[in-house]
Amino acid sequence: MARDPKYDVLFEPVKIGPTTMKNRFYKPPHCTSYGSDWPGTQAHFRAVAGEGGWAACNTEYCSVHPSSDDHGHVGARLWDDNDVRNLGLMCEKLHEHDSLAGVELWYGSAHAINNESRLPARGVSQIPSDYAWMQSCFEMDKDDIQLSTDDAIAVIELADPMVHLWDVQLGGVILEWGEDTLASRFGPQDFQRPAGWQDRGAAVPPSSAAAPEPDPGGGRPAMRVDRGAVTERVVNEAAAARCRLVLGPSAVLTPSGRDRARQLGVEIEKEKRR
């Protein structure tokens, strides 16, 4: 039976950053109770989707630090080399079917009961979990928040599609904002900003803008940002210095920064990964 041409678009390749999905069939994260503890079952279960034609398949929620331990429930995790090898088998099996492997990064904050790691849970505010009975966390100060940010960025960079993580190549990274996890707690209803706090983008480190560089062609000088969040503040600085912004591959332009750049007419150039 011939396929209706209106469905042809579903089978076209889709380029996402440096990777390409072979079609538009994308399998989002969902829990299986396999996690990193049953790597063979996890790998072959996800590979069934790849064999069936799905272009990308994800893990369930994946803890990125021992202080986000959900033991008692079975999720994936990336804490050490053993976890990497376990999830690596899933990547290999999906790649056999020309499918991409994705990971859903998760940090539980007040919901992390830490029965296995025995570490205290930490969050941006000392608000009890509305999910785990009698469970809370301690309120992080700015140093703790920066440390958590650095941990998260390190995991993201290691799991980047262009980087081999101990011989394992992932095809995608998902940041989990749902389920009331750490990132969502930076909202105004939960996060009581300490004295001297400046908003620079939740879960993204502050940008490191270099001094403007003259343009050999005689145009506007360039203000380069190699990594971190490019917020309204950075855009305002570029506008005041009459510069254009050049963003490195690890720099992230926030929505408010993009809107501000349009308002002020600041030209933004994004460098691609090589």
Image: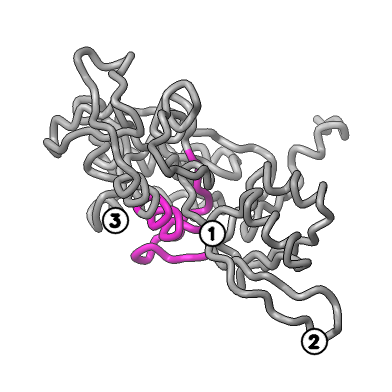
Specify the label residue 207 is tagged with: 1
Residue found at x 58% / y 59%: 251
- The residue at which mark 2 appears reads as 216
Q: How is the image coloured?
A: one colour
In the image, the segment drawn in magenta is 151-175
The quadrant of the rendering that contains the N terminus is top right
- The residue at which mark 3 appears reads as 85
- Name which residue type carries label 3: Arg
Q: Is residue 256 magenta?
A: no
First along the sequence among labels 2 and 3: 3
Q: Is residue 180 above or below residue 174?
A: above
First along the sequence among labels 1 and 3: 3
Mark 2 vs mark 3: give the one in front: 2
- Name which residue type carries label 1: Ser
Query: Dot 3: within a 10 Å radius of its alpha carbon, few (fewer than 14), some, or many (20 or more) residues?
Result: some
Mark 2–mark 3 Cα distance, whole angstroms, equals 48 Å
Residue found at x 17% / y 35%: 120
- Name which residue type carries label 2: Pro
Closer to the camera in the image, 164 or 273: 273
First along the sequence among labels 2 and 1: 1
State the SS at label 2.
Answer: loop
